[in-house]
Image: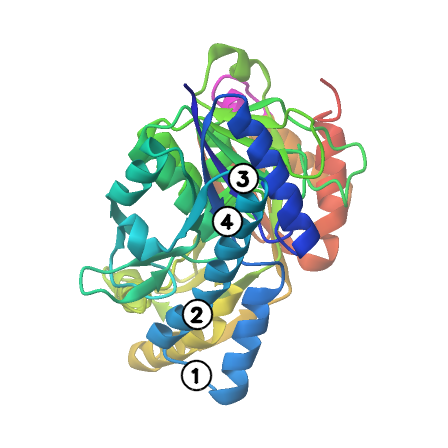
Amino acid sequence: MVLIVQKYGGTSVGSAERIRAVAEHTAETFRKGNMVVLVVSAMGGETDRLISLAHELSSNPHEREMDMLLSSGERISAALTAMALNEQGIKAMSFTGRQVGIITDTSHTEAKIEKVTADRVKQAIDNGIVPVICGFQGITENSDVTTLGRGGSDLTAVAVAAALHADLCEIYTDVEGVFTTDPDIVSEARKLDMISYEEMLELASLGAKVLQARSVEFAKKYDVRVVVKSSFSSNPGTVVTREDKEMEKVAVSGIAYDKNQTKFTIMGVPDRPGIAAALFRNIAEAGIVVDMIVQNISSDEKLADISFTVPETDTAKTRDIVEKVARELNAAGISTDKNIAKISIVGVGMRTHSGVAAKTFQTLSDSGINIMMISTSEIKISCVIDSKYTELAVRVLHNAFELEKE
C-alpha cells in the first residue's frame, strides 16, 4: 500500500463546500487502496482575522499568546474536515500538533521543528483511520504551543511525511503547480513539470509563494518527494525532486520577485576591521535575517558606506539598531528605502551555462532599469531595483530567457 500525505491550504478549506470537496477527494484516494494522512491550514482569511483582532487589543501582542491564538484556526478546519470525512463513510480523527508529537524549539511565531514522534498518527493509520492534522503548529518540550511561521502547514506536511516515511507528499493549493514566474504578471508563464529541490528552495526564499522555503529545505534533507498541484483541477502539477542531468540543459528555470524588502544604508563609517561585525552582530542578536550586503569605500579610503536589505516586517526593529550603532560609530547618517524590489533568476543550469549574468544585466539596462545591489550564488542572480519597475523587469527577463518555451 502507498502512504500519501496530502496538505490543503486555506483556500482549499475556505468554506463548508470546499471542505466537503476535500473530503470527497480524500475518500476517493483512500478507496483506491492508499493510506492517507491529511494536513490542513486554517480556513482562508482566518489567520489574518485573528491577527487583526489581537492588534485591536494590544499594540504589541506577546508572541506566546499569539501562538495560542493563531493555532486555533487549524483546529477548526481539522475538526470540520474530519467530520466531513466521516460523513463520506471514511473513519477520520483530527489531531493537534501536540497530539501528533511535533516538537519544536522555543522561538514563538517562527518555531523550528526538532522532531516528530507521530506515534498516535501511526496507530490511527494501522486502525484504518485517516488522521487529519492541524498544520502550522507544534509544541515545545515545556508544552507551550508554537507556530511555524507563514506557510507553516507546508512544513508540517513535509515533516510528517518524513517521519512516516511516506511515499509521496502532495501540496494542494489554488495554483496548478510551480510556474516559470507569476502568471498574473506574465500571461505566457509556463507550468514546470519538474523542478529540483535547490531551484525550488531558491525560488521560495526569493519571493515565490507556492511553497514555504523551510518546507523545501526539509524535503531536500529527508528526500521527501513533493508534488504541488491544484485542489481545483485534476492536472498533474509539479514534482519537486532531486536534481538530474536533464535539468542542467536549461540555464534559467524561473523568475521570482519580492517587494517586501527594505534597504538600509549607514553612511560614513570608519573603514577598519570589526565595524561590519559590530553592526551585523547586533542585527543577528535581534533575530533579523539580513539578505544582501554591499560596502562602498570612499575616495580617501578612510570611510565606507554599508547598505543591506531586510524583510519589510523588520524595518522598525532594524532602524532602532542601526540608529544606535550609527551613533556609537559617529557615522555620517543613515537612510531607509522601502520602495525597492528584489528580482531573481534561478536555474541549476547556470552552473554550466556562461553569460547568464551579462544577459540579465543587459536586459535590465536596455529597459532603463537601474540595479542598486547584486547578489549571486551558483544557481541564482538577484538584483535590487526600484519597485516601480518590478513587473517590467519580470516581463523582460522572462522574454529574454524565453521561459515560455518548453
Secondary-structure class at tag 2: strand
Q: Percent x, y for residue 35?
A: 43, 28
First-in-chain label (1 vs 4): 1
Q: Going by the image, does 296 lie left or right of 192?
A: left
Colouring convention used in this rendered image of the protein: rainbow
Say which label, 1 or 3, has the lower sequence index: 1
In this rendering, the label closer to the viewer, 3 or 2: 3
Label 1 sits on a secondary structure element that is loop
> Where is mark 2, residue-wise?
266
* Local crowd size for mark 2, using a 10 Å CA cut-off: few (<14), some (14–19), many (≥20): many
Q: Earlier in the sequence, mark 3 or mark 2?
A: 3
Q: Helix or strand or loop: what does disc 3 sit on?
A: helix
Over which residues does the magenta segment extend? 348-355
In which quadrant of the rendered image does the C terminus lie?
top right
Please rate how many residues cluster around mark 4, counting C-alpha atoms within 10 Å: few if below 14, some from 14 to 19, many from 20: many
Find the distance from the CA under tag 2 to the CA under tag 1.
28 Å
Q: Which mark is residue 203?
A: 3
Residue 161, given in percent of the width and then of the height, sits at: 37, 34
Circle 4 SS class:
helix
Q: Nearer the viewer, mark 1 or mark 3?
A: 1
Q: Which residue is mark 4?
A: 82
Q: CA distance from mark 3 to mark 4?
A: 33 Å
Reading the chain from its start, which is encountered first: label 4 or label 2? 4
Looking at the image, residue 13 sits to the left or right of residue 110; the answer is right
